[in-house]
Amino acid sequence: MPFRVWPDMGPPGEIRYALIWRPPSGMLATLPNLKAILVLGAGVDSALDDPTLPAGIPVIRLLGAGMEDPMAEYAMYAVLHFQRHMHAYPRQQRDAVWRRIPWALAGEWPVGVMGLGVIGGFIADRFAACGYPAAGWVRGPRRQEGIEVFAGKERLKDFLARSRVVVNVLPLTAETEGILDAAAFAAMPRGSYVVNIGRGAHVVDADLIEALDSGQLGGAMLDVFREEPLPASHPYWRHPKVIVTPHAAAPTIVDAAERQIIGNVERLERGEPPLGVVDRAQGY
């Protein structure tokens, strides 16, 4: 099967499968014989935001594809960083202060994961296996062994109230944009923490900064932002309670992504349903 790289794709009518990540708006609409759109990542918000996205063509996302472990490692590091007060020791070292800071055991440090999909569910299981009281918040009813599951908007505050650290892995949809706002931060225990490895638009930036400044939140570790690269003028860069990483939690694992994409193309060629088809109405 010939493989072409945009913009040198030859006659548009010959293209049957498009492998994309943030393509130019309108480009996919120029492909009259397209059979499937395969997104080179787990998040599909950038593809679904294109108003010219061809209707009736399946949009397929990566299901984990090897990103589960790196994402879980990032989340585990972030939680341990805050749990053991590692953010405070550099200041003590600078001032030559020898002082141990009391910290809680894993069993006393409830972790909440927002989103229990392939990656979020894996992260929640990893925390539970390490002895943390792990809970998940999801859109609709779901069961996951060893994980306390909170479902629906009516349970969101209960989920937040029991979580010492909230790790966000939600997909970005119209319903989840801005979900981490002043009301959400107020529902969390005072001095708790936020880790965002979902999408930047899940967080209302001004509300997060206000919650950090007031002491309602003790800190935040952020890997994703509304604008990337994060502008040099953004207050996150210089905020003493914020750790910024450059969308580095988990790059696409090439070998695993290749296997999944090729497998889906083979299924489509055989007339079989592919794995990871996105529900456009739900946004994931």
Image: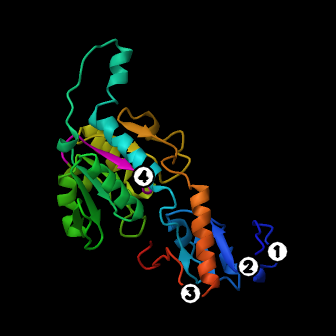
Which residue is located at x 42 percent, y 56 percent?
Answer: 198
Measure how far apart labels 2 and 4 are at the Cα level.
34 Å
The image shows residue 161 at horizontal and vertical percentages of: 18, 53
Q: Residues within 10 Å of mark 2 (few under 14, many from 20)?
A: some
Colour setting:
rainbow
For the C terminus, the image quarter is bottom left
Decide: is 221 above or below 50. Answer: above
Which residue is located at x 82 percent, y 74 percent?
Answer: 10
Decide: is 100 above or below 105. Answer: above
The image shows residue 87 at horizontal and vertical percentages of: 34, 30
- Residue identifier under label 3: 56
Residue 15, numbered label: 2
Residue 272 in view here = yes
- Residue identifier under label 4: 197
The image shows residue 29 at horizontal and vertical percentages of: 66, 80
For badge 3, the amino acid type reads Gly
- Residue identifier under label 1: 10
For badge 2, the amino acid type reads Ile
**Lower sequence index among marks 1 and 3:** 1
How many numbered circles are shown?
4
Mark 2–mark 4 contact, CB under 8 Å? no
Measure how far apart labels 2 and 1 are at the Cα level.
8 Å
For badge 4, the amino acid type reads Ile
The image shows residue 256 at horizontal and vertical percentages of: 57, 60
Residue 264 in magenta? no
Which residue is located at x 36 percent, y 41 percent?
Answer: 78
Mark 2–mark 3 contact, CB under 8 Å? no
For badge 1, the amino acid type reads Gly
Mark 2–mark 1 contact, CB under 8 Å? yes
**Lower sequence index among marks 2 and 1:** 1
Range of residues picked out in magenta: 189-199
Of residues 193 and 18, the one nearer the viewer is: 18
